[in-house]
Amino acid sequence: MAGIYIHVPFCSKRCTYCDFFSSTNMQNKETYVDSVVKELELRKEYLSGEGIGTIYFGGGTPSQLDIRAFERIFETISRLYQIDDDAEITLEANPDDMTPGYVEGIATLPFNRVSMGVQSFKDEDLHFLNRRHDSRQAFKAIALCKENGFTNLSIDLIYGLPGQSMEDWQFNLAEAIRLDIPHLSSYHLIYEEGTPLFRQLHAGKVKPVMEELSVAMFTELIDTLADAGYEQYEISNFAKNKLYSRHNSSYWKGIKYLGVGPSAHSFDGKTRQWNVSSMTKYFKGIAAGLPDVEMEELDTKTSYNDFIITGLRTMWGVDLHELQKLYGEELLTYCMKQAAPHLKNGLLVNADSVLKLTRQGIFISDGIMSDLLYV
Ligand code: SF4
């Protein structure tokens, strides 16, 4: 089963830390929907007859699209593909878009999962990040989703904000648990180059949190959620009752997916492709019947490196038999040689021929992964 990702590149206001491709110009929405429908048609052979197990509307802010826009996109997907009866169909949403009428509307569509960019339940954090919503809207949006039958809910929470205390972070985690949200994605604030936040940092206007507090917050995240019955199935993703994000898990498991919309990425098992990150160029390419796409053929080395990174990030780990089957004896030997010091130091474990990060290893996962890469 393959996946389809639709990138919805509209945000009514830009958050200061974000480097995703999106625009605050809403005038192009209609052209955008026409183009997505046409791109789905143009690239219908990309997944070569595979059934669809997951559909994910990400952004940007997908909840900036109206119900009719989704209907048109779903009609196109259903006409072109065989969608699995049990498919996971996710809408990423911003809390302030989730009005009673809108949530009722999306409940009539094939969506069965909502992932909400809550980020924090504290207004001062949301204000600092230049988010559009406040905590009251976040609580209300979650309640509305539940009332309308969305039980498979996910929220994003950010930690490591300047001025955020451990108590603030504990409050956010406690609220997520109290609200019985079955899936959480939680990331440390990153100062991405080119963002307003990055400029504020370099102008000395914000002070990053101390390293020790960052580590303590990550520890708090892991321990608090484990105590509340969540599995850390990926470094930054936690789920209760096995409600893992099947769409995101398919990225980590090397499953094929088609990405539609400006800046969307695709993977067909042999190549990676990415659409142009420009609304104008995207519209132009689609109108001409020639999507503006760049492509990279994955050689054995790159493919092995992806296999290591995506495997180690998850609780499913790197299957060494699979590694040998896909990349041969030589790369298996290389992997084990590079892994040896980390196995000895307790940062990696080899459990029934599956290589996994230990709890200690999770804290320095980037370094461990880079040691195992073939360069
Ligand atoms: S709403 Fe999401 S995509 Fe839009 S600017 Fe904020 S973080 Fe970025």
Image (spheres, rainbow, N blue to C red):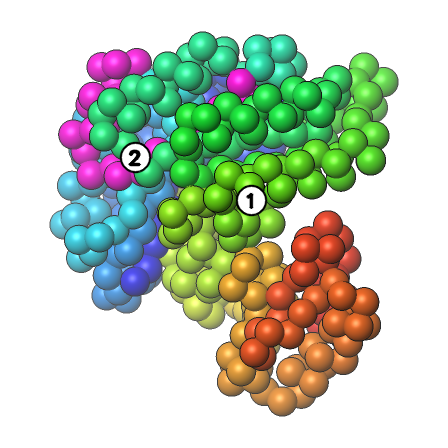
Q: Is residue 275 visible?
A: no
For label 1, the residue is: 226
- Give the class, few, some or many, for how many residues have Cα within 10 Å of label 1's Cα (few <14, many ≥20): some
| Of callouts 2 and 1, the N-terminal one | 2
Q: Magenta stretch?
A: 99-121
Which residue is at the front of the view, 82 or 214? 214
Any atom of ligand 1 within 8 Å of the CB at mark 2? no
The image's mark for residue 151 is 2
Counting from the top left corner in percent of width and height, residue 206 is at 79, 18
* Amino acid on which the number 2 mark rests in the picture: Thr
Q: Position of residue 124 (x, y in %)?
A: 62, 11
Of helix, strand and loop, which one carries label 2? loop
The quadrant the C terminus occupies is bottom right
Q: Residue at x 33, y 38 (%)?
A: 152
Assess disc 2: are there few (<14), some (14-19) or many (≥20) residues with their C-alpha within 10 Å of its C-alpha. Answer: some
Discs 2, 1 touching: Cβ within 8 Å: no
Q: Could you say where residue 369 lies in the image, as x and y percent from the top left?
A: 70, 62
